[in-house]
């Protein structure tokens, strides 16, 4: 890789910041922490739910909103009314968020990006300077405003929203549902913004190809820096008793991409002694209970409900193996978390999972959408506890060496340097993406 000058100061913008709200909160926290350890000064501008304290950041500026979509979804209609009376109600962005939520659109990325543009423009006028802006999966039009101010701008897309929209369309049962899915996801806006900024970071070769195909981002502006894991937290515990019969699956039955129905079908083909622990919503209306009753395996299924991270780690540590029956993954975090905790994996040969499994070497791959193939793979790994232990020990070392946040931060900082060198007119290597582990 061509040598480049890493930035001295970077500003992250993220429309949601808490680690419980999804992958972007985890990504923001750990990447910002590791970049600061590399000597890069980090500022953060973030929307609710806000991140945990970030003492490593130079500053954290919070941009409030009324979280209209979440309140509309939970029918908290009174909570959607803006605080501050009529003046606040007539604020253009407040009106936009309220109206868009009522019409079934997701307004947060657009509204947050405009608030972030306004906040950073004010700080620039006051004399603050950044070498680069790093957007975290927002891709609202305000991001283009920051670029118009002359700032280098990069973004992170773990997978484009077009993937989520396709999954939603599969799940939809009526024409009205399909119209709602087409309206909800701001795919067009995000694609237009992604095509116009300096670099798109992503976490796998599969995601890089999907971003190029769906968002039409030129391949030389997409860079695979992999995804990170807190390997100090996700780690084996020798004093935890490991089951010889418990299978673990982490995934929402409501998301067709997670393949939970195939997992239930595979459980029905396995010997009676095997049980399945599913980390998913345990509401009685969850379809997984209906599928389990139909398959005759209800008594062998345990659905945990939402669990804290330390409970999830313990589930990984005690399981005989983890099953990832997904129909698509842009990275496959449960597979990596499991291998980091010393538990081997059976996964489907889809999306980025072949990349992840080839990199970590902690299990085996089977055909997707096949309960028979999944059950066969589980039987193969369950024949030998020694084989499972050897796979797990090898995979743990490879996760540490390739997928720690330190590695991801270093690759990201090198990507920043390439963007800055391009801005200065200096030659850099042409990139489509890096090979995993490079």
Image (tube, grey):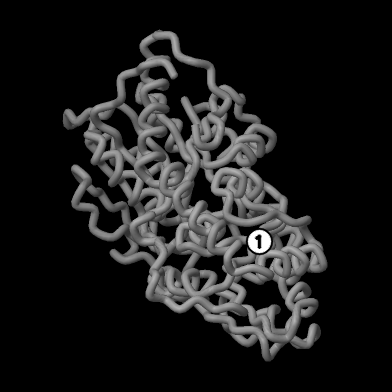
Spot occupied by residue 346 in the image (x, y as percentages of width and height): 66, 61
Q: Look at 65% across and 35% down and name the residue there.
A: 209
Q: Look at 38% across and 27% down and name the residue there.
A: 414
Q: Look at 65% across and 84% down and name the residue there.
A: 301
Q: Quadrant of residue 191?
A: top right
Q: Quadrant of residue 145?
A: top left
Q: Quadrant of residue 285?
A: bottom right
Residue named by callout 1: 346
- Decide if residue 273 is in sight here: yes
**Element type at mark 1:** strand
| Image side of residue 273 versus residue 91, left or right | right
Spot occupied by residue 170 in the image (x, y as percentages of width and height): 76, 60
Q: Is residue 431 above or below residue 321?
A: above
Spot occupied by residue 341 in the image (x, y as percentages of width and height): 45, 63
In front here: 397 or 413? Answer: 397
In front here: 383 or 275? Answer: 383
């Amino acid at each position: 890789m061509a040598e480049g000058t890493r930035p001295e100061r970077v500003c992250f913008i993220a429309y949601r910041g808490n680690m419980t709200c999804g992958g972007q909160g985890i990504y923001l926290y750990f990447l910002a922490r590791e970049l600061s350890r590399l000597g890069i000064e980090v500022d953060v501008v973030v929307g609710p739910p806000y991140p945990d304290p970030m003492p490593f950041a130079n500053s954290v500026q919070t941009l409030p909103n009324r979280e209209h979509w979440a309140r509309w979804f939970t029918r908290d209609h009174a909570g959607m009314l803006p605080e501050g009376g009529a003046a606040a109600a007539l604020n253009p962005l407040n009106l936009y968020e309220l109206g868009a939520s009522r019409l079934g659109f997701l307004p947060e990325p657009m509204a947050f990006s405009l608030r972030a543009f306004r906040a950073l423009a004010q700080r620039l006028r006051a004399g603050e300077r950044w070498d680069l802006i790093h957007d975290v999966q927002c891709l609202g039009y305000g991001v283009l405003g920051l670029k118009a101010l002359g700032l280098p701008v990069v973004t992170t897309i773990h997978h484009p929203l077009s993937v989520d929209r396709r999954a939603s369309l599969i799940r939809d049962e009526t024409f009205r549902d399909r119209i709602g899915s087409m309206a909800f996801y701001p795919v067009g806006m995000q694609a237009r913004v992604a095509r116009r900024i300096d670099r798109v970071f992503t976490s796998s070769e599969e995601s890089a190809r999907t971003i190029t195909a769906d968002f039409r981002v030129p391949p030389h502006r997409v860079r695979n820096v992999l995804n990170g894991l807190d390997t100090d937290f996700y780690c084996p515990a020798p004093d935890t008793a490991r089951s010889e019969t418990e299978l673990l699956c982490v995934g929402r039955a409501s998301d067709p991409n997670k393949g939970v129905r195939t997992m239930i079908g595979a459980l029905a083909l396995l010997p009676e002694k095997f049980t399945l622990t599913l980390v998913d919503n345990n509401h009685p209306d969850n379809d997984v209970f209906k599928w389990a009753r139909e398959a005759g395996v209800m008594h062998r299924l345990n659905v945990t409900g939402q669990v804290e991270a330390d409970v999830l780690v313990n589930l990984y540590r005690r399981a005989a193996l983890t099953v990832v029956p997904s129909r698509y993954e842009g990275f496959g975090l449960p597979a990596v978390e499991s291998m980091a905790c010393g538990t081997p994996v059976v996964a489907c040969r889809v999306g980025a999972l072949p990349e992840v499994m080839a990199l970590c070497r902690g299990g085996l791959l089977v055909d997707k959408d096949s309960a028979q193939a999944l059950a066969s793979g589980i039987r193969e790994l369950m024949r030998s506890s020694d084989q499972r232990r050897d796979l797990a020990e090898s995979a743990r070392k490879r996760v540490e060496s390739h997928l720690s946040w330190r590695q991801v931060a270093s690759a990201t900082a090198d990507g920043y340097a390439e963007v800055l060198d391009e801005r200065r007119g200096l030659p850099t290597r042409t990139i489509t993406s890096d090979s995993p582990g490079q």
